[in-house]
Amino acid sequence: MFYGEYRYKLDEKGRLVIPARFRKILKKRHLIITRGLEKCLFLFVEDDWKKQEKKLRDLPFTKGNPRAFSRLFFSGASFCIADGQGRITVPLPLLDFAGIKEKIVLIGVSDRIEIWSEKNWQDYLKSSLSSFEEIAEELVNGKGEK
């Protein structure tokens, strides 16, 4: 559904532009933005959000890790709709969480869009590209089998 890497700047009102390729998918749909992992934000369309919500709801709330993750994931969530120019407003606490000041990178990750500060994305790429092949081998072949 969502693929690619796109670079933008936040406008003076804290809005970001959704790439034209994504706008067709997002048009007139409810979107949910929340805290992601590795200091990025996750942006879901409502149907995919509901799938994630169900997975988290099915975890035992009596255990600490699922409870803590759910609190942070859902408390940061905000509903939004792209305006006529394909922009969404990102709440200030989420911008702060992701360290986003001006330059951003949006990446399509199949069922979601991730929103990164340019610096955090560059740092992530630098630290992860060296293990890309190793991770691929493990995921495809199962525990590194050749």
Image (spheres, rainbow, N blue to C red):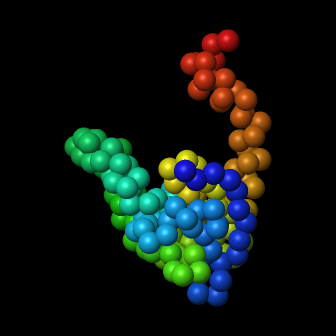
For the question of whether residue 76 can be seen, the reply is no
- Find the residue positioned furthest to the left: 62
Tell whether 119 sits left or right of 27. Answer: right
At 66% from the left and 29% from the top, the residue drawn is 136
At 65% from the left and 83% from the top, the residue drawn is 11
Q: Quadrant of residue 16?
A: bottom right
At 50% from the left and 65% from the top, the residue drawn is 26
Residues 125 and 61: in front is: 125
Residues 120 and 136: in front is: 136
- Find the residue positioned furthest to the front: 24
Classify 142 as above or below 2: above
The x and y percentages for residue 135 are 65, 30
- Please state, as top left, top right, bottom left or bottom right, where the C terminus lies in the image: top right
At 61% from the left and 18% from the top, the residue drawn is 141
Residues 64 and 104: in front is: 104
The x and y percentages for residue 81 are 45, 74
Classify 40 as above or below 146: below
Tell whether 105 sits left or right of 111. Answer: right
- Find the residue positioned furthest to the bottom: 12
Classify 142 as above or below 113: above
**Image label count:** 0
Q: Quadrant of residue 129?
A: top right
Classify 79 as above or below 43: below
The x and y percentages for residue 20 are 64, 67
For the question of whether residue 75 can be seen, the reply is yes
The x and y percentages for residue 119 are 73, 62
